[in-house]
Structure formats: C-alpha cells, structure tokens
Amino acid sequence: MITITMIFTGIFLLMHTALSATTSAHRAKYDVDFGDGGNLAMLKAIRAQGNFIEYVPILLIAMGVSEYVGAAPWFI
C-alpha cells in the first residue's frame, strides 16, 4: 500500500482547492471571464494554480512508484 503517497495526495487536493478558490475569487473581484484581463494579481493567481497543476501529478507518480518499489520513507 502506498500510504505516504495517499496522504500527500489528500494534502495536495486541499491545496488545489485553495488555489482554485483564490483564482475564482480573483475572477469575480476583477470581473475577468477569460485570461488574466491585463491584471497582474489575476495573472499571478492563474500561474500559481497552473504551476501546481503542471508539477504535482508527476511528483505524485514519482512518489507512488518509489513507495511501491520499497523506497525508504525518508526518501519519499
């Protein structure tokens, strides 16, 4: 069982929910339906969420594979 990876998956899901809520709140606050509307705060929120979505899946895959093959918990 890949317990450590599952714990991190739950943590990352909560973090993604927070990033999504922040991005949605910025969209409502600045009345931006598409893109960043030329607003720097909106752009930062979009990129924070985007970077998270780009990097977390490969990290979780690497963690899961490492845990599956028996890597030490401190390594994971």
Image: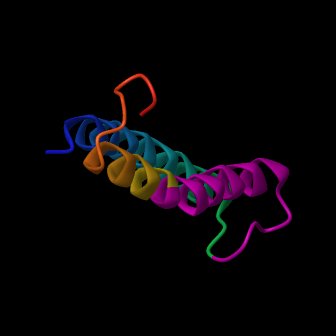
Which residue reaches farthest bottom?
Answer: 34
- Asked if residue 33 is positioned above or below residue 31 in the image, the reply reads below
Task: Pick the quarter of the image with the N terminus.
Answer: top left
Image spot of residue 45 (x, y percent): 67, 50
Q: Quadrant of residue 51?
A: bottom right
Residue 62, x across and y down, in percent: 45, 53
23 to the left or right of 62: right
**By what rule are the colours in the image chosen?**
rainbow
Quick check: 39 above or below 15?
below
Taking the view exactly as shown, the residue that stands out farthest to the left is 1
Residue drawn where x is 57% and y is 52% of the image: 52
The foreground one among 4 and 65 is: 65
> Which residue occupies the foreground of this view, 76 or 7?
76
Q: Reply above or below: 58 against 29.
A: below
Please give the name of the residue rendered at 66% of the width and 77% of the height, measured from the top-left corner.
34
Q: Residue furthest front?
A: 70
Decide whether residue 18 is among the magenta residues: no
- Is 53 covered by the magenta stretch? yes
Residue 44 at x, y percent in the picture: 75, 49
Magenta residue span? 34-58
Q: Residue at x 41, y 52 (%)?
A: 60
Where is residue 37, by image quadrant?
bottom right
Q: Could you tell me how many numbered marks the image carries?
A: 0
Query: Quadrant of the image for the C terminus?
Result: top left
Occupied quadrant, residue 42: bottom right
Magenta stretch prevailing secondary structure? helix
Q: Residue at x 43, y 40 (%)?
A: 15
Instruction: Give the percent coordinates (x, y) of residue 3.
Output: 19, 37
Q: Nearer the viewer, residue 11 or 31?
A: 11
